Image (cartoon, grey):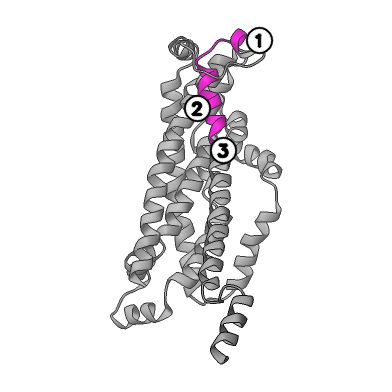
Amino acid sequence: MTLSSRTVSSSLAGPSAGPRPPERRRRGLSRRGRWAVVRHGALIMGALVSIFPFYWMIVLATHSSEVIYRFPPVLTPGDLLGKNLASIFSRINIWAAMANTVLVAATVTFLVLLIASLAAFAFAKYEFAGKKVFFGIIMATFLLPAQLATIPQFLLMSRLGWVGDLKALIVPSLASAFGVFWLRQYASSAIPSELLEAARIDGCGFWRQYLHVCLPMIRPALGFLGMFTFIGSWNDFLWPLIVLNDPSRLTLQVALSQLKTAHGTDYGMLMASALISIVPLLVIFFVGARQFIAGITEGALKN
């Protein structure tokens, strides 16, 4: 009687509770899997949306203005890229403009990294009179829009006799408040004070500490700031347009702006010029991003 009552009660109770946890785990995994698919799908869609403007620029650079104005728009590349590029080369001296832009951007980037890293190292790891006051003044420059300094800068460049010269683009760009702030914040946490103390005990002065301790430790931050500065200097348009008046000294962005005329705009040629200006930036970005990621990985392995 006891065995039969247990059998009946177990049959009335239905299936045992043993298999339920695996089923719940399978359902939980399937939900996580579905959410993973949704997340990856959203990321892929976001990437496609981000890439589409570059693809659209390439498509427009291979067509004429008549085709660009069609509706519905043409979404496949054409065969006029060579013609549009030839029109650009015949109208402006694009190689001289690109050489000027590379010279300005590379010089500004190198000097900004040098000056900002020196200031950041001093602000992060040294104590001196007026440290907080000086750093506060640097931070206060963030409150001033760049356009506000255009007229005073032009008057200063005019008195120095630099109007029309590339020095007028390089020198005013060397004081980077963002660079000092960014590197100072990074150096404060990345450079151990104990390591600097050990270097001082070994007889290392400021410059040896800067070269052999500071620069290797903040290399990822320097990589980011270098990319940020180079791209900003390459794309600068307003200040070069104001201060440069020599056709042989024009930067790329100012030279390309001459393609627009009062009689009409050839958008195919304009998009081809935009394609020319963006290719060096893509190369710099991919090279810099690889070094930036490598620096982060190296720092993680050291820790």
Q: Which residue is mark 3?
A: 50
Contact? badges 1 and 3 (CB < 8 Å): no
Three-letter amino acid code at the position of disc 2: Leu
Magenta span contains residue 60: yes
In the displayed orientation, state which residue is furthest to the bottom.
2
Give how far across and how far down residue 144 sits, in percent: 70, 51
Q: Residue at x 53, y 42 (%)?
A: 44
Disc number placed over residue 130 in the picture, else none: none
Query: What element does badge 2 sit on?
Result: helix
Report the amino acid beneath label 3: Ser
Predominant secondary structure in magenta? helix
Which residue sits at x=41%, y=54%? 292
Q: Quadrant of residue 287?
A: top left
Residue that mark 2 sits on:
252
Q: Earlier in the sequence, mark 1 or mark 2?
A: 2
The crowd level at tag 3 (other Cα within 10 Å; few <14, some 14-19, many 20+) is few
280 or 112, which lies in front? Answer: 280
Instruction: Give the structural element (helix, strand or loop) at label 3.
Output: helix
Q: How many marks?
A: 3
Quarter the N terminus occupies: bottom right
Marks 1 and 2, how far apart in space? 21 Å
The residue where tag 1 is placed is 264
Q: Where residue 86 sits in the image (x, y, percent)?
A: 44, 11
